[in-house]
Image (cartoon, rainbow, N blue to C red):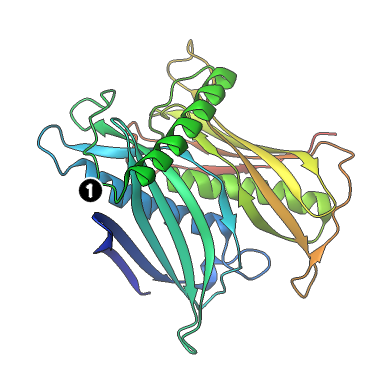
């Protein structure tokens, strides 16, 4: 498997110098969804990894505490074209705005047929990261500022920052939690996409693919020993698409007095496809469909990988 990490280049836009990260990986059969294309969750995971690399690298450019940039929010992610097994994914991440305590990263995904050389843009996404000190994971560190080609470009970035900040505050009010890092964001998003896909497939009984992902908000860190439940429910259908709301909840096994809490929330949009990959009409929503995956034993670090002895249980349920 070809996989290139840390490939860096600098882009010059007027007086501005942007640093970008490019990740390349060939898509294998174990990356496939039920249609035979690349799983949407696999693409989301690659997008987050590229964003995490560039934002963490940038936040450690200045003296002071070493830090890791934690994913706080994913804006709408569009799935423009399917990526096929055997194609090479080119994931490019670019810094586009910085505030005192956050970084905006824009990510594009291109697919390449290495036999013909043809390429196409398959995905676009915007992510926001917040740097946390490695010495004190509750401490948010300052972000080095980037230079902009013009005042207008900086002002546009500030408007995007204010808009996402307002939406994050609204999400905080709904869930009653602060915005701090969550374990393995890329893995979490892949699990969320899998659950949303189960709900969509149950409803239409056809092949389904991810069309887009609305804002994913990361609310709280998942601590060691928690039972983590990824749940999805269909909330809306149109003639052409299905909207699925997905939650990630954590339930401490040891500190039982604290109870279950909401860690992540998002909305996924799916479309139904026939055997030839063409869109099909979606039947109206008459019963509430849901699905969930339960995962036991996450480690304590917000950025650690799951322990080898972790076990995973699939628990699927339908509510009418």
Secondary element type, mark 1 = helix
Task: Please give left or right for residue 14 compared with residue 125 in the image.
Answer: left
Q: Quadrant of residue 313?
A: top right
- Residue 30 horizontal/vertical position (percent): 52, 67
Task: Please give left or right for residue 292 compared with residue 42 in the image.
Answer: right
- Residue 49 horizontal/vertical position (percent): 37, 52
Which residue is farthest front? 151
Q: Residue at x 55, y 18 (%)?
A: 173
How many other residues sit within 10 Å of disc 1, few (<14), some (14-19) or many (≥20)? some
Which residue is farthest bottom? 116
Quadrant for the C terminus in the image: top right
Specify whether residue 263 is in view: no
- Residue 144 horizontal/vertical position (percent): 21, 38
Q: Residue at x 59, y 49 (%)?
A: 193
Q: Nearer the viewer, residue 307 or 146?
A: 146
Q: Which residue is mark 1?
A: 57
Q: Residue at x 58, y 55 (%)?
A: 78
Which residue is farthest top? 257
Quadrant for the N terminus in the image: bottom left
Q: Residue at x 49, y 89 (%)?
A: 116
Q: Nearer the viewer, residue 295 or 243?
A: 243
Task: Please give left or right for residue 282 compared with residue 255 in the image.
Answer: right
């Amino acid at each position: 498997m070809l996989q290139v990490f840390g490939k860096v280049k600098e882009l010059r836009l007027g007086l501005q110098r942007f640093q970008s990260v490019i990740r390349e990986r060939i898509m294998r059969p174990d990356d496939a969804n039920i249609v035979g294309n690349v799983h949407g969750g696999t693409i989301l995971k690659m997008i987050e990894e590229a964003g995490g690399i560039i934002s963490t690298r940038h936040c450690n450019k200045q003296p002071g505490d070493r830090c890791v940039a934690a994913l706080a929010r994913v804006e709408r992610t569009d799935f423009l074209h399917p990526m096929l097994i055997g194609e090479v994914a080119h994931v490019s991440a670019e810094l586009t705005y910085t505030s005192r305590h956050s970084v905006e990263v824009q990510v594009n995904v291109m697919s390449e047929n290495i036999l013909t050389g043809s390429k196409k843009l398959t995905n676009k996404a915007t992510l926001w990261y917040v740097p946390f000190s490695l010495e004190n994971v509750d401490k948010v560190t300052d972000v080095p500022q980037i230079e902009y080609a013009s005042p207008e470009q900086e002002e546009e970035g500030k408007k995007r920052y204010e808009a996402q900040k307002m939406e994050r505050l609204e999400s905080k009010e709904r869930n009653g939690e602060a915005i701090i890092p969550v374990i393995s964001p890329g893995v979490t998003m892949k699990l969320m996409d899998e659950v949303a896909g189960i709900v969509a497939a149950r409803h239409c009984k056809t092949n389904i693919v991810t069309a887009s992902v609305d804002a994913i908000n990361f609310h709280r860190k998942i601590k060691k020993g928690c039972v983590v439940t990824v749940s999805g429910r269909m909330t809306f259908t149109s003639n052409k698409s299905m909207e699925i709301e997905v939650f990630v909840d954590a339930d401490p096994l040891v500190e039982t007095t604290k109870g279950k809490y909401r860690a992540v929330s998002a909305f996924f949009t799916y479309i139904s496809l026939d055997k030839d990959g063409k869109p099909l009409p979606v039947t109206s929503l008459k019963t509430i469909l849901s699905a969930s995956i339960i995962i036991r034993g996450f480690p304590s670090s917000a950025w650690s990988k799951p322990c080898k002895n972790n076990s995973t249980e699939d628990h699927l349920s339908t509510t009418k």
